[in-house]
Structures are given as structure tokens and as C-alpha cells.
Image: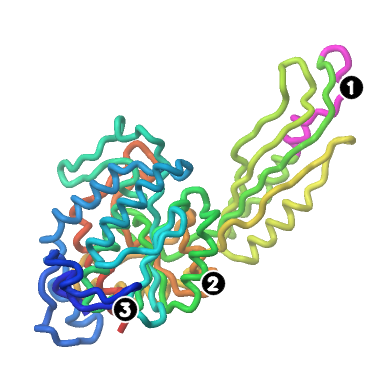
């Protein structure tokens, strides 16, 4: 059900959350629809939500601005701590309970019962400190801009406002991590443990245009290191073992593993070798990005990469890396996507669409532990990691309403 205010009764970690504990701060979502009757999710429970979140839009945008102005590059410990402090402050104001702090990661477990729905986001970005100077926060002509606005600080704010709009959020866990852009090295275990046993994981990564993300490719990453032998390139090149040439052989062999018909891409990315222009290269290395649609294909590529053998006599290979994120198959999102389409119709939204994408998210991890997962529920817009990063303001109320309705349905 949808609640009228942040002051509605609910239980959170560490004590009861009620109107007196939080003060008189009210959610701008308005009154519970249908006079307080508990209706079937997807029917009348969603009525009026879009209008109510439209009325709440100024408050939502104000919270987005707060988060965007707190620059939070993934590798800056101090900046991440300051960003986590700010997300904590905004979340505590809206949810009435403080989160657990696990390093740069924040976890709200609402209610005393077992977790049933995981809501997932991250507050770190790829943008370095100082990016606000070249990409200032702005809202003009219905477009919101600023570093990290699309990926994914608007999504974090949408999640907080959606959960605050629930009549009783017991069973919801909100996890906001601080290292997703690095591949989630310290939060992966936390994401997987929180997702395990939940009926659903709702991921607030940005939309693909306005579409939900119904499948994601799995990701593997490798570094192929080559050891050769240095020699003078003019006096006695024959005494050397050219690591640059060996790296070229291996790079072509790796690239040949791509099978577009299977949705498999194997892409060499960074490449380097040698120390000077007149020396046979003694060392070389390149990195590889792999995207696959199935776990079986991920295993196949992993075996092939680790089976690489040197071509040049005397050369040696060292192969590092492996699977980073499992695929998020369409089967993992099928039931939740069907529910989202039904709820979208009840909300009066344009038909909800979904697309598979090549990029990965923490939703890959939740699907990997068997939890039904729907991704791309965050902001609509474009330009993730790019100069033209932006959010379409007009889409925020409807998408926040959809998330609220999904949460209510999953908790029912």
C-alpha cells in the first residue's frame, strides 16, 4: 500500500519509526489512495501516484541536487565518506531510521521480519573531483545535468522517495554501495548476501532511454602479460625475444574468440610493450573485456583464454583475471517485467518496454544468486560517463510511481 507521509507507522532497525520519532516531516506523495482500503497490487493501489510524485518533484530535485553536488569518485575515500554522510542524512530524513554503515556502503533494513525485497543502488561515480566546475548542476528546459546525475544519483533519490511512500516498508532492504563503478570489489559479497532469499531485487541503475533493462551480459576481464628478452634493435635483434610481437600474436588470438552470433564479444582494450624505440621489447601486456549472454559461454571463453600458448620460442605468458559478473538472463526478470507492465498500465503510463543491454551492474550479482531481478528502474535520460550525461525531469514522477507500485506488489 501507499502511505500518506513519512510519519506513517513502520518498524526499522534499532526501534520503531513513527510520526513522533521523525517529527512532522511529511512525504509529498499525499494521502493513501482509496480511502485507506487495501486493494490488490496493480489494481487501484497505484491510482494517483504519478500526480502525487509530480507534486513531490521539487523536493525530489532538491535531494538530487544535494547528492550531485557531493562529488564521489569511486577511488576517493574521503569524498565517498562525505557522500555517504549526505545519503545517510537524506535517507534518514525520508525513512526515519539511520542505515548500517559498512565502509562506504549503506544498508537500510526496514521492519523486524525477514527481508523480502532488495532495492539496490550506488552513490559512487566515475567523475573526478572538480567535475562540477566543468559540468555544473543545472535544470533547464526539463533536462537535469551534473556529474553522476544519470548514473545514478537520481536513482538513489527515487528509491528513497519511493520507499518513504509505502504504508509499511517492512521487508524492504535498501543497499546503496560505494564501489560499483570499480566492479564492486568490496560490496559484491554484501550484495549477494542481501539478495539471497529475497523474492525480488529492484535495481535503480538508469534506464536504457526510457526502457527497463531485462537482461545484461556477463563480464569477464583479463590481463595477458608477455615476457620476452631485451636486445639492441640495431646491433643484435636476433638475440632478443620480442614481447611486442608475441603480444600481437596473442591479441589476435584473443580477438578471434568473439562470436557475435552468440552475443559474445572479446575486445582487447589497453595495449603496451617495450621501454625504448631502439630496444627489442622485453615485456608487453594487454587487457581484454569479455561480454557474454550465458554462464556456459563465459566458462568457454575463460578456458580458451587461460589455454593460450606462446608463439615465439623463448616467450612466456602470464594470464590474469576471469569472470567478473555473471550474466543477468532474461528469465531472471521475466516475471517482474510482466508485473511492471501491468502496473504501468494501472498508473496510466506509456507502455513499459524492456531491452537487453551489454553493460553490467550489481543486478548481475543478484540474478547470479537466483533472485528475480529487474534493472533500469532509475532515471531516464542518457550520457552515462559522458559529457552529455543528463536526466529527463518529466520522467521522474512516473518512474518513481512505478517503483513504489512494484515495491507494494512485491511486499503484498
Residue 17 at x, y = what percent? Answer: 24, 74
Residue 135 at x, y = what percent? Answer: 29, 34
Residue 238: numbered disc = 1
Residue found farthest to the top: 235
Residue 353 at x, y = what percent? Answer: 32, 65
Q: Was residue 276 drawn as part of the magenta stretch in this picture? A: no
Spatial CA distance of label 2 from label 1 is 53 Å
The residue at which mark 2 appears reads as: 369
In-image side of 67 versus 197 (left or right): left
The residue closer to the viewer here, 407 or 107, is 107
At 44% from the left and 53% from the top, the residue drawn is 104
In the rendered image of this protein, does residue 348 appear above or below residue 92?
Answer: below
Q: Give the range drawn in magenta.
A: 234-249
At 50% from the left and 69% from the top, the residue drawn is 367
How many marks are shown on the rendered structure?
A: 3
Res 351 seen here: no
Label 3 crowd bin: few (<14), some (14–19), many (20+), radius 10 Å: many
Q: Nearer the viewer, mark 3 or mark 1?
A: 3
Q: Earlier in the sequence, mark 3 or mark 1?
A: 3
Label 2 crowd bin: few (<14), some (14–19), many (20+), radius 10 Å: some
At 64% from the left and 60% from the top, the residue drawn is 298
The residue closer to the viewer here, 69 or 15, is 15
Amino acid at each position: 500500500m501507499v502511505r500518506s507521509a513519512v510519519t506513517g507507522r513502520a518498524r526499522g532497525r534499532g526501534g520503531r519509526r513513527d510520526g513522533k520519532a521523525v517529527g512532522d516531516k511529511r512525504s509529498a506523495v499525499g494521502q493513501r489512495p482509496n480511502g485507506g482500503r487495501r486493494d490488490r497490487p496493480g489494481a487501484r493501489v497505484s491510482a494517483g501516484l504519478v500526480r502525487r510524485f509530480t507534486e513531490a518533484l521539487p523536493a525530489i530535485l532538491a535531494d538530487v541536487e544535494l547528492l550531485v553536488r557531493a562529488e564521489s569518485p569511486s577511488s576517493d575515500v574521503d569524498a565517498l565518506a562525505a557522500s555517504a554522510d549526505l545519503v545517510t542524512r537524506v535517507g534518514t530524513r525520508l525513512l526515519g531510521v539511520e542505515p548500517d554503515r559498512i565502509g562506504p556502503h549503506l544498508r537500510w533494513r526496514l521492519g523486524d521480519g525477514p527481508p523480502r525485497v532488495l532495492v539496490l543502488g550506488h552513490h559512487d561515480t566515475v567523475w573526478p573531483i572538480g567535475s562540477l566546475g566543468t559540468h555544473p548542476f543545472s535544470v533547464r528546459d526539463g533536462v537535469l545535468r551534473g556529474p553522476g546525475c544519470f548514473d545514478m544519483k537520481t536513482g538513489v533519490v527515487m528509491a528513497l522517495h519511493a520507499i518513504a511512500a509505502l504504508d509499511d516498508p517492512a521487508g524492504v532492504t535498501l543497499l546503496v554501495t560505494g564501489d560499483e563503478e570499480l566492479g564492486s570489489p568490496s560490496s559484491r559479497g554484501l550484495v549477494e548476501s542481501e539478495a539471497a532469499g529475497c523474492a525480488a531485487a529492484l535495481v535503480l541503475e538508469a534506464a536504457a532511454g526510457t526502457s527497463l533493462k531485462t537482461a545484461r551480459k556477463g563480464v569477464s576481464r583479463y590481463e595477458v602479460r608477455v615476457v620476452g628478452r631485451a636486445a639492441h634493435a640495431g646491433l643484435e635483434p636476433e638475440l632478443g625475444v620480442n614481447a611486442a610481437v608475441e603480444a600481437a600474436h596473442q591479441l589476435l588470438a584473443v580477438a578471434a574468440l568473439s562470436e557475435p552470433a552468440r552475443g559474445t564479444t572479446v575486445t582487447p582494450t589497453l595495449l603496451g610493450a617495450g621501454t625504448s624505440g631502439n630496444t627489442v621489447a622485453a615485456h608487453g601486456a594487454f587487457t581484454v573485456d569479455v561480454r557474454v549472454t550465458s554462464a556456459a559461454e563465459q566458462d568457454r571463453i575463460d578456458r580458451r583464454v587461460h589455454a593460450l600458448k606462446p608463439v615465439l620460442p623463448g616467450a612466456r605468458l602470464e594470464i590474469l583475471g576471469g569472470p567478473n559478473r555473471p550474466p543477468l538472463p532474461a528469465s531472471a526478470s521475466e516475471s517482474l517485467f510482466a508485473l511492471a507492465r501491468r502496473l504501468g498500465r494501472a498508473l496510466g503510463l506509456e507502455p513499459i518496454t524492456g531491452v537487453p543491454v551489454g553493460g553490467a551492474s550489481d543486478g548481475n550479482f543478484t540474478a547470479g544468486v537466483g533472485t528475480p531481478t529487474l534493472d533500469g528502474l532509475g532515471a531516464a535520460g542518457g550520457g552515462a560517463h559522458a559529457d552529455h550525461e543528463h536526466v529527463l525531469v518529466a520522467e521522474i514522477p512516473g518512474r518513481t510511481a512505478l517503483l513504489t507500485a512494484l515495491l507494494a506488489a512485491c511486499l503484498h
